[in-house]
Image (cartoon, rainbow, N blue to C red):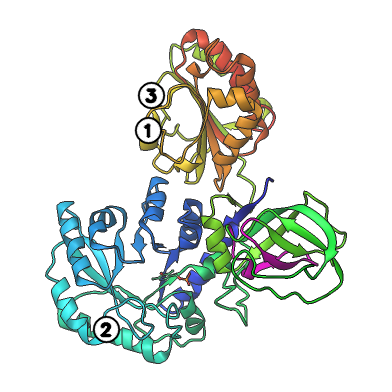
Amino acid sequence: MAAPCVTVDLGVIERNARAVTAACARHGVSVFGVTKGTCGMPQVARAMLRGGVIGIGESRLENIRRLRAAGISDPVLLLRSPPPDLADETVRLADLSLNSELETIEALSRAAERRSRVHEVILMVDLGDLREGVWPPELMPAVARIVVWPGVRLVGLGTNLTCFGAVLPSAENMGRLAGYARRVRAEFGLELPHVTGGNSSSLPFLLAGGMPPGITNLRLGETILQGGRDTFFDEPWDELDRSAFTLEADLLEVKVKPSVPIGETGVDAFGGRPVFPDRGDRLRGILNVGREDVDVAVLHPVEAGVEVLGASSDHMIVDVTEMAPPPSVGDTLRFRLGYGALLAAMTSEYVRKVPMFDQPPPRPRSIALDVDPGLAAAAVAAKAAARIAALNLAPSPGGMPARLTEHPSARLVADTGGDSLGLVWLTADAGLLARLLELRPRLAPENIAVVGLREASDLVRGTPLSVATIVDVDARGIRDVMRRALDAATAGTRGYLLLCEAGVHTPGKGLSEREAHQATEAVAARPGLLGLEFTGLTPTAVPFACDLLMSALGRTIL
Ligand SMILES: *Cc1c(COP(=O)(O)O)cnc(C)c1O
């Protein structure tokens, strides 16, 4: 795997989410899963939702846009209040937001009214950490203002601790928050379902049984994503797994060198004056990541015998003297990341993010074939039937799910239920993209790979689709193009669909007959194909489509 990259084990995240939501539920506390450490990666949000969180917490509208584009329609809580002039966008993207300024809440109310919506607001109270929140004496007057604004509904009170002032949760401050909620309920007749008592740093306090009744929610990121590497620093909670994220980087140089620089020393590239203990000659390695990508102070090597010495902007220096056997140039080293390193790596454009399930994709047991009348249906069916029988699959008992397009087509669909699917789309023209996303709202654009494009609509430009034009196919070859397309379609998905538009193979202009075969053979070799559809077929194109279909079924479709 070409490094540097961060692999994201979605199974670990799902299990961590399940562990924290179960523990919180025992104390009557619900959980928003916070994805900001991954820049709102939709696969991560889905893993958290499978693990039982009631919604997703995000601090940036850009990240919420990414979640929504991927079809996530569960409640999303905006954690950082928006500036008033982003009220409209906030109301459009988020269901709820944490707020502490009346001016902003009033702007949210007006924006929501314009959209005939009601936006839910959780009012933050500052209990002493000195980040966001109204000062307690101002709480009741603030509520009195909010309840008359028609576009917002006050659904809770919240607080943030251990962020700026490093104030810890306690029976005293949590009890005060619960008390404020009781007063607001009594005085204004509100329900206030969400009394949200903080972030991951409140979890140890809850587990120790200290959380007073009346706190009904927590917003948890670090404990779910990182297994509490920072939160349970001294005493790990053994229900959490810290191995969800792994940074992989390649060794560019491996040489024996002295441990102390030679020559007069000044300041380093970042203005520091480094001091090096003399340990004699050591085997040192240089990796292809640097401060641009990661906070090297909080990297934890996975391989034994690796010690991080430091980094400049693009190079990280490690001591590998103790590694057995000693590493070579080109070898990959792996690291776990503290929260700061995770944030930096997930934000760096130079680090690939590779979400993956810890389970192989499911192997469907049944399959359905559906051919438009008039397309030599019997011939297609007969040819496919033999292959299906050879693959030992039962015909699907249920009906066919919605078709991907409405053009004459032949399709073969295994189980396409559920979310987290990717799509490889062999097509000359992506004009049907909008229709496709409408039919399959849970298909994330970042898991759609288009191959063989000759006409790019504006729709395709500026979306996170992975696109290879016919020129890319000429330049890189279909094998490489398909490898990357399949990487995109399977990144953190449970399987993928193949959609093949007949016009992609147009003699002299589009994919050649051999390239089309190679493309479908690449599909056959990649596990996880759950369905395929050939569209835009004319009766004369059917025999070729049939050949491709067989080629995609190859040995491994199922
Ligand atoms: C980031 C954030 C959280 C989540 O913090 P973790 O320590 O990752 O659990 C919760 N609430 C707010 C307001 C945040 O900004």
Horizontal and vertical percent for residue 356?
Answer: 60, 50
- Closer to the chain start, of discs 1 and 2, is 2
- Closer to the chain start, of discs 3 and 2, is 2
- Give the position of the C terminus as an image quadrant: top right
* Residue designated by label 2: 135
Inter-mark Cα distance, 3 to 2 = 58 Å
Q: Does the magenta segment cover residue 306?
A: yes
Q: Residue at x 17, y 71 (%)?
A: 146
Q: Which residues are magenta?
A: 293-314
Other-residue count near label 1 (Cα within 10 Å), few / some / many at <14 / 14–19 / ≥20: few
Ligand 1 rendered quadrant = bottom left
Q: In screen coordinates, is 205 left or right of 341?
A: left
Inter-mark Cα distance, 3 to 1 = 19 Å
Q: Amino acid at mark 3?
A: Glu
Q: Amino acid at mark 1?
A: Leu
Q: Is 115 rendered above or below residue 230?
A: above
Residue 414 visible? The answer is no
Secondary structure beneath dot 2 equals loop
Inter-mark Cα distance, 1 to 2 = 47 Å
Secondary structure beneath dot 3 equals loop
Horizontal and vertical percent for residue 536?
Answer: 44, 18
